[in-house]
Each structure stands twice: as structure tokens, then as C-alpha cells.
Image (cartoon, helix red, strand yellow):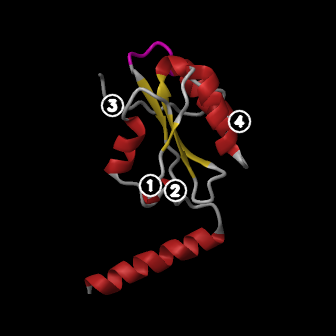
Amino acid sequence: MRQGCQVVDELHESGLNAALTMAMTKLASSDFEKVLVLPTDLPGLAREDIVQMAKGSRPAIAPDKAGTGTNALCFAMDQQPAFAFGENSAVRHLHRLHLSSGKSARVVRTSGLAFDLDTVGDFHHLSHVWRSRCEKAA
């Protein structure tokens, strides 16, 4: 299996779902086997989180800490779901992953994938965690 990544620039601000659909169109002729959709607001993300998302043949979803939003998706290149990021997207993505692949999606729950930065409270929590780590290291 080929590994690597490709960055696809969004030419016009069109929203996440439209940008992902455009990126998939551009990647259609690539020889990648799987796609990992991974937002950049996951400060605790670790290598093992990515490994957990990519393993196996079934599509995977990582819900947010509340279990309602979507923090990551992984699926075979030829089994792209219709993207549905936004409020309460986890249920929509679970359904769409099943429709596009014919398989039930694995739900991956790790702290690195669950904690995202959506609210002021999330940033306060992150600040507290970093401060605690710095104090322990000193």
C-alpha cells in the first residue's frame, strides 16, 4: 500500500464539505488506497490515533468528546461518503459510511481524536493541561 499525503489547496472559500468533495475529485486519479480526513484542531493527536483510524478494511469514524460531532473519517478511496461535517455530524457520517461501503463503520475513540478545539472552554482546558505539564516538568 502506498503511503503519503497530498495537500489540495482550496481555491475558493466554500465550506469544509465542499472543499473535501473538491479534494476527492482531485485525488480520484491517484493510487492511494485510503483517505484519512483529519481536521487540524486536534492538539492531542498522536501517531497511534492515526494508526487506529487507518487499520482494517472497514471505514472508520472518530466522534468528538460529546459523541455528536466528527473529528476524523477514514475510508477506501472508492468508497467516499457524502461529507456532512457540521453540528451533529457523527450520526450522518456513520450512515453515509455504511451506504458508501456496504460495511458498518468502526468507531474509534481515543483521547487524541476526541478532544478538539471548538469553544473558548476547549482552549482554556488546553491551556490548563499545558500549564500542568510544564509545572510537572520543572
- Looking at the image, the residue that sits furthest to the top is 29
Query: Closer to us: mark 4 or mark 2?
Result: 2
Do the numbered discs 1 and 2 sit on residues whose CB atoms are within 8 Å? Answer: yes
Instruction: Give SS at disc 1.
Output: loop
How far apart marks 4 and 2 lie (CA) works out to 25 Å
N-terminal label among 1 and 4? 4
Instruction: Give SS at disc 3.
Output: loop
x and y percentages locating residue 22 in the rendered image = 61, 25
Is residue 21 among the parts visible in the rendering?
A: no
N-terminal label among 3 and 1? 3
Instruction: Give the residue number, with chain letter if any, for mark 1.
Output: 110
Instruction: Give the residue number, with chain letter if any, for mark 2.
Output: 114
Label 2 environment density (alpha carbons within 10 Å; few <14, some 14–19, many ≥20): many
Q: Residue at x 57, y 59 (%)?
A: 65
Label 4 environment density (alpha carbons within 10 Å; few <14, some 14–19, many ≥20): few
**Which mark identifies residue 4?**
3
Which corner quadrant of the image does residue 44 belong to? bottom left
